Image (cartoon, coloured by chain):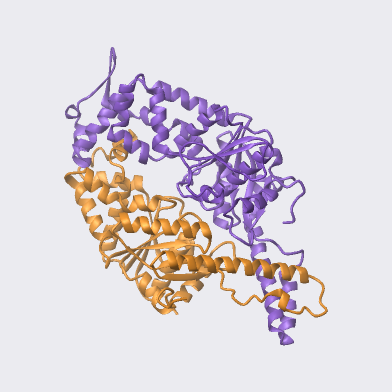
């Protein structure tokens, strides 16, 4: 592994949380929420004032980072709030109840993303926190989310939307303020998707990319080839142990091939998070992963 | 239990539901291959814009917006076809089918507000997926349609999709802009409505003009859209339509799947089976403690490599146990007999050969050793 590719743990946390805003992005199932929690935990343990932001969806982060503040932002609520603050005080409620707000959202696609980003910008600028970590939008929504501001800059020639879009774009394109952490798994499909996403972000969004986080990396490198090992006189469960070793070795070989492919395909450094022997990540797992990131 | 035999059997439509990253696309592909092997003429529709299905089926050039035949070695009886939903193209087809003339259709598809709806309105993708389902179901080339639903935030969007445009048009906003006249509707000028003027100040007046022009062009077409929505809803409720819930054995996806099962039931649909993908094998009937004890003994004797082998067995059994524990709420929710387990394979699934191996688990004549 070339040393410039794989970050040492000492610099991993520093690099991943170098900006005041960090947006964590990745396809469904890769552990975006886990990575968000780990970054928040590690930064909080290092003494920084951390805010975690969750977008829409069900709240899943609360239990993972006890004692770190978590905010849930919902686009419909923020759009209402936005209208309320921009001269629609009297009719904001009516706009929502009559469905006019849906027409506004459709007439100006991205406006819901923009109000969310606008709120994030406000939190980032408030001075209350040293680091804001956003559990980014799911599935393929990341690019649309990140390009909402330039899209609206084209559409709106003036007024509050344009001001908001300009301010958001300033934040996103400032490498000292904002970076995107892409998350993947050491498997074929997630690696393919990360490669596609990273190039799309490079081409279409002027935002700094942080080192890639590869989640659930199997740390086992020392499972010997069972055909080289004598089981002595043991019989019971020997076949199970042999099958398990062959299974693990094959998965680790596959994993290594994917990690290498990622190194070749994307010129970003990698931080690897160890797989936990569990089917449900809890606050303890998050703390263990965070400790591994900063020591 | 013989996997999905009874579920897919003579189904005309199979809808794969579940949260993102649980292997929905792979499951849809496996069902497609197996159905073709059994002599069915099957088409698999994927909504996932990534190349997952194309990669899995070994189609180097990706998938087109129209069904294309997938060559399957050794299968002669049936046919496998695959397509990826092209949402804007599908929407345009639906508009053209419902428009009174080409001129009306052109006016709509050239409108920027319409283009926003076709590309970005939340629910449009699900809506067009249901339209594609309707179209393919009526296509005589196919006797089975397998749909891989979009990875929605709200997993139910697909079931509610047919009504999405009808509901949009039902909005008071629409009526706010339109005044009924003897000959149909007349669109109010923006200037006469203070609320529209105010909105124009926020989003820009060009944007609003586009919206008004869209509603104007659309006038009269909503009846056709509503009828179509009812047909799609009826098809989803048909006995020949089977819903498959797809999950993986992690706590968050299991919670999501159980919640999804409830929602599907509330909508009056039945989940025919629940597929749980990527379960770690158990490696025998022994326990974690058995393996750990053997590892300790080997370590005490200084047999380092042997200890590593027993430790590995203990590790894998620990994960397998944890996964089965997480799965329990789903087992209680849908019943053990409705769950089809698919093991995690030693290698990632990305070719037809691996899909065929998965097929042996999904459609086992004999229950595969879990």
Residue B357 % position (x, y): 67, 52
Task: Look at chain A in the picture and name its colour.
Answer: orange
**A116 w.r.t. A262: above or below:** above
Tell me which corner region of the image, top left, top right, bottom left or bottom right, holds residue B250: bottom right
Q: In the rendered view, tell whether residue A195 sits above or below residue A268.
A: above
B362 over A25 or under it: above or below: above
Q: Who's the residue at 71% across and 74% down the image?
A: A226
Q: Residue at x 23, y 51 (%)?
A: A165
Q: Position of residue B111 (x, y in %)?
A: 28, 32
Counting labels gives 0
Quarter assignment of residue B251:
bottom right
Coordinates of residue A7 in the picture (x, y in percent): 42, 75
- In which quadrant will I find the C terminus of chain A? bottom left
Q: Nearer the viewer, residue B357 or B95?
A: B357
Spot occupied by residue B69 in the image (x, y as percentages of width and height): 55, 39
Chain identifier, purple in the render? B
């Amino acid at each position: 592994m070339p040393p410039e590719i794989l970050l040492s743990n000492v610099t991993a946390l520093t690099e991943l949380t170098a900006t005041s805003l960090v947006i964590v992005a990745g396809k469904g199932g890769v552990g975006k929420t886990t990575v968000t929690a780990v970054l928040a935990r590690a930064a909080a343990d290092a003494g920084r004032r951390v805010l975690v932001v969750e977008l829409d969806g069900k709240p899943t982060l609360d239990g993972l980072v006890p004692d770190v503040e978590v905010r849930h932002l919902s686009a419909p609520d923020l759009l209402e709030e936005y209208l309320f603050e921009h001269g629609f005080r009297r009719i904001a409620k009516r706009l929502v109840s009559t469905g006019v707000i849906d027409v506004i959202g459709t007439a100006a696609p991205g406006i819901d993303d923009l109000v969310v980003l606008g709120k994030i910008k406000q939190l980032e600028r408030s001075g209350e926190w040293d680091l804001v970590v956003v559990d980014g939008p799911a599935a393929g929504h990341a690019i649309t989310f990140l390009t909402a501001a330039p899209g609206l800059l084209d559409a709106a020639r003036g007024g509050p939307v344009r001001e908001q879009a300009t301010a958001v774009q300033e934040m996103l394109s400032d490498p000292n303020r904002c970076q995107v952490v892409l998350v993947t798994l050491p498997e074929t499909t997630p690696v393919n998707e990360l490669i596609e996403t990273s190039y799309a972000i490079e081409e279409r969004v002027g935002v700094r990319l942080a080192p890639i986080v590869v989640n659930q990396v199997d740390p086992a490198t020392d499972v010997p080839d069972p055909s080289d090992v004598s089981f002595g006189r043991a019989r019971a469960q020997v076949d199970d142990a042999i099958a398990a070793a062959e299974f693990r070795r094959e998965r680790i070989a596959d994993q290594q091939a994917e990690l290498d492919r990622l190194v070749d395909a994307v010129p970003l450094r990698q931080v690897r998070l160890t797989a936990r022997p569990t089917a449900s990540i809890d606050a303890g797992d998050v703390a263990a992963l965070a400790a591994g990131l900063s020591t | 239990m013989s996997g999905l035999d009874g579920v897919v059997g003579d189904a005309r439509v199979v809808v794969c539901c579940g949260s993102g990253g649980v292997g929905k696309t792979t499951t849809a592909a496996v069902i497609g291959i197996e159905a073709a092997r059994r002599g069915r003429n099957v088409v698999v529709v994927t909504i996932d814009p990534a190349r997952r299905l194309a990669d899995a089926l070994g189609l180097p050039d990706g998938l087109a917006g129209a069904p294309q035949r997938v060559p399957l070695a050794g299968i002669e009886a049936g046919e496998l076809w695959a397509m990826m939903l092209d949402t804007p193209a599908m929407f345009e087809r639906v508009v053209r089918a419902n428009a009174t003339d080409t001129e009306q259709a052109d006016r709509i598809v050239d409108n920027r507000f319409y283009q926003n709806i076709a590309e970005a309105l939340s629910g449009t993708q699900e809506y067009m997926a249901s339209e594609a389902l309707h179209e393919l179901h009526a296509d005589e080339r196919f006797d089975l349609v397998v749909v891989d639903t979009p990875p929605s935030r709200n997993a139910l969007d697909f079931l509610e999709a047919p009504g999405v445009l009808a509901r949009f048009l039902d909005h008071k906003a629409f009526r706010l802009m339109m005044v009924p006249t003897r000959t149909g509707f007349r669109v109010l000028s923006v200037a006469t409505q203070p609320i529209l003027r105010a909105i124009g100040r926020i989003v820009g007046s060009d944007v609003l003009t586009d919206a008004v022009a869209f509603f104007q062009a659309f006038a009269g077409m909503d009846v056709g859209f509503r009828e179509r929505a009812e047909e799609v809803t009826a098809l989803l409720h048909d006995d020949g339509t089977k819903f498959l819930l797809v999950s993986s054995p992690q706590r968050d996806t299991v919670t999501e799947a159980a919640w999804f099962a409830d929602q599907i039931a509330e909508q009056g649909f039945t989940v025919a089976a629940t597929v749980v993908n990527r379960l770690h094998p158990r490696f025998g009937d022994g326990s974690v403690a058995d393996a750990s004890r053997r590892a300790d003994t080997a370590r005490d004797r200084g047999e380092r490599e042997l200890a590593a082998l027993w430790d590995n067995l203990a590790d894998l059994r620990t994960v397998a146990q944890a996964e089965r524990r997480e799965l329990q709420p789903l087992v209680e929710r849908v019943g053990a007999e409705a769950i089809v387990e698919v093991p995690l394979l030693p290698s990632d699934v990305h070719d037809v050969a691996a899909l065929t191996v998965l097929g042996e688990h999904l459609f086992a004549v004999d229950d595969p050793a879990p």
